[in-house]
Amino acid sequence: MSGKYLICVLFAGMVLLHSGCAAVLLTGASGGVAYTLTNVAYKTVSFPFNRVDNAVHGALRKMGILHIEKKTIDGGVQIAAETPDLKIYIDVEMITSKSTRLCVDVRKNIILKDKATATEIIEQTIKILEAKAATHSVMRK
């Protein structure tokens, strides 16, 4: 009986690890930032792609993170950045003309990920977007 149970548990674990869409939503201090099972932070924001792309670069500058490379990917861009201890990969993907998805993968090494830094990059990006939106709405009045 225990052999069958072990096989079922192993199979279920393999299925979960291979599922690209499986995610666990963590709320509270992270402000609704979600994480995939591989600890990649992601969030969809209600701002146009270009504004989000610019805000990501602003967040990296604000945090003192060195931007390394930016390349076009299907539906958006991928930004590579680093600190002395971390490798950072950020995907900015257009969902619609008014919404954009951010995916942030921060790696300490091949195995360890840094969810706190990934979350902070997203939160700083959102703060920049919201501050600019508030400025635009004041200027329109």
Image (spheres, rainbow, N blue to C red):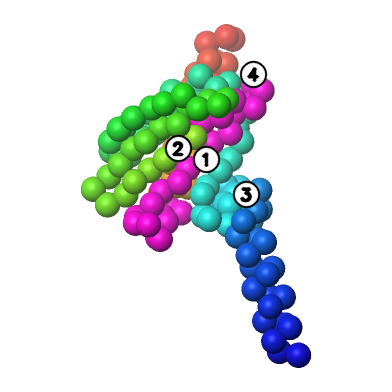
Name the spot of residue 74 as percent of width and height, x first: 55, 26
Q: Which residue is mark 2?
A: 90
Q: Residue at x 69, y 87 (%)?
A: 3
Q: Distance between the Cα atoms at labels 1 and 2? A: 6 Å
Check residue 13 in the rendering and tell me which mark sits there, or answer none.
none
Check whether the beta carbons of the residues at disc 1 and disc 3 lie within 8 A of each other.
no
At x 52%, y 40%, the residue is 103
Q: Residue at x 51, y 55 (%)?
A: 39
- Read off the magenta span: 92-116
Amino acid type assigned to the residue bearing label 1 in the image: Cys
Give the residue type that dot 3 points to: Gly
Three-letter residue code for mark 4: Ser
Element under label 2? strand
- Left or right: where 73 falls relative to 4: left
| Residue denoted by label 1 | 103
Extreme bottom residue here? 1
- The reply, left or right, for residue 122 in relation to residue 46 is left
